[in-house]
Amino acid sequence: MITIIISLSVVLAISIFVNINQLKKQEDQSDYIEDLEKSNTDYYAFYERLKTKLNQANSEIRNVDRLGAFESSDEVGTSFKLIKEVMDDLNRGM
């Protein structure tokens, strides 16, 4: 009878230890998931702000050269054309 009580006590102690260990792991994973969700939310907000600013900059650059004055100039035109191409590429990517 005593051997049964001792063996059940050992099994109970091991079970308690295992359950506590699993609980700690689950809490760590929950914290990691919360951090990951927060970083995803932050990245999405950054992406949306970048997209908005890019659209504003693209509108502004098209508005600045609505007459084509910058595009026709040699030195300024080359830089302006490059900037315009980059803006178009970024707009297509977003």
Image: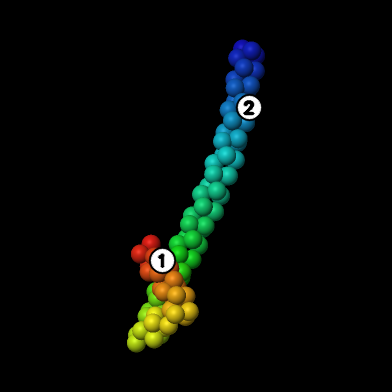
Q: Amino acid at mark 1?
A: Leu
Q: CA distance from mark 1 to mark 2?
A: 61 Å
Residue 74: % across, % down: 44, 80
Q: Locate the C terminus and report the quarter of the image it occupies.
A: bottom left
Residue 86 image position (x, y, % from top left)? 43, 68
- Quadrant where the N terminus lies? top right
> In this image, 15 relative to 63: left or right?
right
The answer to which of 50 and 10 lies nearer the viewer is 50
Question: Picture quarter containing residue 29?
Answer: top right
Q: Amino acid at mark 2?
A: Ala
**Secondary structure under badge 2?**
helix
Instruction: Residue 24 in the image: state x and y as whole percent.
Output: 60, 40
Q: Is residue 45 above or below residue 20?
A: below
Q: Which residue in the protein does label 1 denote?
A: 90
Mark 1 or 2, nearer chain start: 2
Q: Characterize the local packing of mark 1: few (<14), some (14-19) or many (20 or more) Cα atoms within 10 angstroms.
A: some
